[in-house]
Image: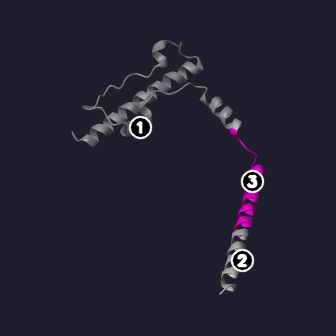
Amino acid sequence: MSDRLRELLRQRTLLQDHLAWLEREIKEADGAAQPNAAATQPPPATAQPSSPPAASTMGPMATTPGPTDTGSVADDILDKYRVKPTSVQQDVRKGCFLYFTLGFIVFALGVLGLYYALRSQ
């Protein structure tokens, strides 16, 4: 069996295990199943590769999912750093005027420097 085929089979097994865990979590959230310690942990992978895979080949499904309320935590963090669009537009506008002014000053100093340099000759 080639390494690619073995890796594909391992990934398929991981996805099937993850889907089974998701089904159990959905049933538990609906109240159809009683929560227990075994239902909250995803089952271990049934197909073990002959050598441990590198971290880059494991993919996102190899880790256990986080808590179910991550959406509200993420929204709280995003709200903390959210800026009004009008504020961003004003900052960009001020930055453009600032760069234009600085560029004009550098240009004027360059012309003035050339004027004095060529005048003395």
Disc nearer the start of the sequence (3/1): 1
Please, is residue 41 above or below residue 3 in the view? Answer: above
Residue named by callout 1: 59
Q: Position of residue 45 (x, y in %)?
A: 35, 26
What segment is highlighted magenta in the picture?
A: 81-103
Q: Nearer the viewer, residue 117 or 39?
A: 117
Q: Position of residue 85 (x, y in %)?
A: 75, 49
Q: What secondary structure is marked by label 1?
A: loop
> Which tag is nearer the camera, tag 3 or tag 1?
3
Which residue sits at x=75%, y=53%? Answer: 91
Which residue sits at x=45%, y=15%? Answer: 38
Which residue sits at x=68%, y=76%? Answer: 113
- For residue 27, which quarter of the picture? top right
Quarter of the rendering occupied by the C terminus: bottom right
- For residue 10, which quarter of the picture? top left
Type of amino acid at the residue the image marks with label 1: Gly
Type of amino acid at the residue the image marks with label 2: Leu
Determine crowd level at label 2: few under 14, some 14-19, many 20+ residues with C-alpha closer than 10 A. Answer: few
